Image (cartoon, coloured by chain):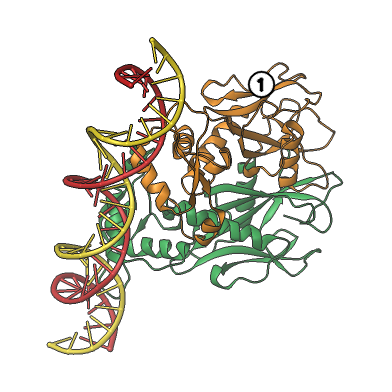
Chain colours: A green, B orange, C red, D yellow
Amino acid sequence: MEQILPHLDSVFSIDCVLFGFDGKELKILLIERNEEPFKDWWALPGNIVGPDESLDQSASRILYELTGLRGIYMEQYYAFGDPHRHPQGRVITLAYYALIRLGGDKELRPISSYAKRANWLPITDLPKLAFDHQKIYDKGLEKIKRRIKHQPIAFELLPEKFTLTQLQHVYELVLGKKLDKRNFRKKIVSFGVLKELDEKQKGVSYRAATLYRFDKRKYAKLFGKEISF
Amino acid sequence: MEQILPHLDSVFSIDCVLFGFDGKELKILLIERNEEPFKDWWALPGNIVGPDESLDQSASRILYELTGLRGIYMEQYYAFGDPHRHPQGRVITLAYYALIRLGGDKELRPISSYAKRANWLPITDLPKLAFDHQKIYDKGLEKIKRRIKHQPIAFELLPEKFTLTQLQHVYELVLGKKLDKRNFRKKIVSFGVLKELDEKQKGVSYRAATLYRFDKRKYAKLFGKEISF
DNA sequence: AATATAGTGTGTATTTTTTACACTAAGTAA
DNA sequence: TTACTTAGTGTAAAAAATACACACTATATT
């Protein structure tokens, strides 16, 4: 976040790439700035790190203030500290990404003053971003692309119960490529971290798919062994 | 680095895990502190980020001041910012690792005041470290373990001309496990990034091995394709 | 000159993993 | 009942990973 610049030699902020999945698209949450510099531009949400906050806490707080959500999966992934990245002084920023399942419409809370509004925008059609936020976003996407191949983070984007097709969809969106249905299922099931439920999808106008759940216990037992996509 | 604490709300430092390979062991460069807190403890080298330095520049400077080396492979990998990680105030630190080929003995330069001395210590036998430096080191090792599987960083630890056995040795030390000689050679050669030289190892009292060189051109052509170990 | 020593360099068979590929089944809507 | 839409499944071929052992070569020693 870039709005407050106390008179310190350097300022410390956190910027977040909040990835959300609504069942259809992969989106990120952007705010439209209401202050100079970059007034009226879209930017990643961020803020100054509080004096008694850990970095992770600070990131969680930013997310909470914007969305009202807690307990979301977040990961710090890089520090951006070019001396000229902020036109008004030195601001070193730590980048976090978060993975969020988007449910109803009531995801967003009232906006703090420095932003006009916030919006979930599909990553396939992003506007120009303020500061070096495009670079921050790019690196964030790169990181989750890599991570989804080795860690069970896809489930963070899905509801607790999901179909294999939905899961595949998440992988395809993150990796940016189509996957073969049969091979995908074979592989994902072979990891042994999914629990098949006695329940079917509801409200669809075609054959309902079986629901699955991510089984944290089984995953814990795998610890050390790498998933590899 | 932890020795200077100006009266700011937060201070920004960089700490470096400098990995070095001397042909036998994997080592890191530690300094023995000459100031409180943690006087007489071993610590990772570090320093405050200068006002007009980029983060990468700052890390390179720290390395240069200690070793006289430039152009070394360094990578930023995590920010440590627990509010209580430094007993005297808030210091957020960015961690970098570097990979260094250790040649003769003249690697080290005169030490700045806050340290008594600096020393290359084998990672198999590290002392207790000041602050949260053990955590920083652990994460650094974890990162290069992961990275060496996908990126040609092993060559940074070796002289320009090296034997396949030496290369295998680096992989074994970083990954912490033995590898099969024939399979290792098959795989590493199949990547097509090594150039076999018309030259043999010298000064050994047994059959001399063929020397190889990492071929950056060939590697550049592979870009996008992943190496996988 | 013969011998001991120490590391180099090589091939194959087996298993495992990855890939490519297409149709029937089930449920809903008209 | 029919049309529509997605769910769910298997196999063969290719590629990659693994396990494994011995002869060669240069030097040092006697």
Residue A14: image location, x then y, percent: 68, 49
Residue at screen point 82% across, 59% down: A87
The three-letter amino acid code for the residue at tag 1 is: Trp
Say whether residue A71 is visible.
no
Front-most of residues B188 and B143:
B188
Residue at screen point 27% across, 74% down: A206
Residue at screen point 74% across, 29% down: B2
Front-most of residues A107 and B59:
B59
Specify the farthest residue to the right. Answer: A7
Instruction: Decide if residue B125 is on the left or right side of residue B187.
Output: right
Residue A102: image location, x then y, percent: 49, 61
Q: Chain of mark 1?
A: B
Instruction: Decide if residue B136 is on the left or right side of residue B117.
Output: left
Q: Secondary structure at mark 1?
A: strand
Residue A193: image location, x then y, percent: 32, 47
Residue B217: image location, x then y, percent: 55, 58
Mark 1 is surrounded, within 10 Å at the Cα level, by few (under 14), some (14 to 19) or many (20 or more) other residues, namely many
Q: Which residue is mark 1?
A: B42
Front-most of residues B212 and A108:
B212
